[in-house]
Amino acid sequence: MSIFYLIGLMGAGKSTVAHCIGQDFKLDVIDTDAWIEQDSQKTIAQIFNEQGEPYFRQYELECFEKTKNKKNTLIATGGGMPCHLDLINKMKAYGIVIWLDIPLGILVERLWHEKNKRPIISYCKDKVDLEAKLNYSRINRYPFYAQAHYKATTINEVKRIIFEKLIMKQTVLA
């Protein structure tokens, strides 16, 4: 398989990791949130506010359907994408799913100053509130994230997994 999906909570660094690794391994990179914003000409926050979460989740499904047959591609998903519309199983059927699992304390520090850009946490009044919301999301999303083929906590672990999968593919084809 030559399609990789990065899943994990918001702020885990999926987009950043995908762009760095994509360059290293000459993989195409798709950021599903950026794809949705470009296609809709609206921010994720605008979509949530104007059309609601179910509409946004349908957009994620559309993005998956349009990208599922890509080759040599690394896809950074939105944090909730694998948790809706059976997308975790669809991702697993079409590629390798890697859960980027970052400690809550790091996520809080990363997200605190950009919380107004993220509709799910925009109401958090302080870092304690933000940590509670992230912990709630982690608990609810764990059953989906835990289905990933691999779990990584650093960019180097993600690189190793992708490197091994790409080398295995070349070895089988040789």
Image (cartoon, rainbow, N blue to C red):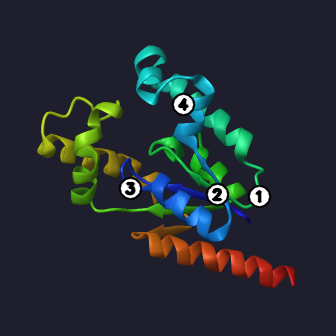
Which residue does the numbered mark 4 point to in the structure image?
37
Q: Nearer the viewer, residue 134 or 158?
A: 158
Compare marks 4 and 1 and give the one earlier in the sequence. Answer: 4
Which residue does the numbered mark 2 point to in the structure image?
92
Q: Nearer the viewer, residue 115 or 151?
A: 115
Tell me which amino acid carries mark 4. Glu
Tell me which amino acid carries mark 3. Ala
**Residue 135 seen in the current view:** yes
Tell me which amino acid carries mark 1. Lys
Viewer-side label of 4, 2: 4
Task: Residue at 28%, 46% (x, y): give it.
Answer: 111
Viewer-side label of 1, 2: 1
Residue 126: give x, y in percent of width and height. 12, 39
Residue 16: give x, y in percent of width and height. 46, 56
Q: CA distance from mark 3 to mark 1?
A: 24 Å
Residue placed farthest to the right in the image? 174
Instruction: Decide if residue 141 is on the left or right side of residue 130.
Output: right
Which residue does the numbered mark 3 point to in the structure image?
12
Residues under numbered marks 3 and 1 in contact, where contact means CB atoms less than 8 Å apart: no
Residue 10: give x, y in percent of width and height. 38, 47
Which residue does the numbered mark 1 point to in the structure image?
71
Q: Is residue 9 above or below residue 61?
A: below
Compare marks 1 and 2 and give the one earlier in the sequence. Answer: 1
Viewer-side label of 4, 1: 4
Residue 169: give x, y in percent of width and height. 76, 76
Task: Residue at 40%, 49% (x, y): give it.
Answer: 141
Instruction: Decide if residue 37 is on the left or right side of residue 106.
Output: right
Residue placed farthest to the top in the image? 50
Q: Residues within 10 Å of mark 4 (few under 14, many from 20)?
A: some
Element at label 2? helix
Element at label 4? helix
Q: CA distance from mark 4 to mark 2?
A: 25 Å
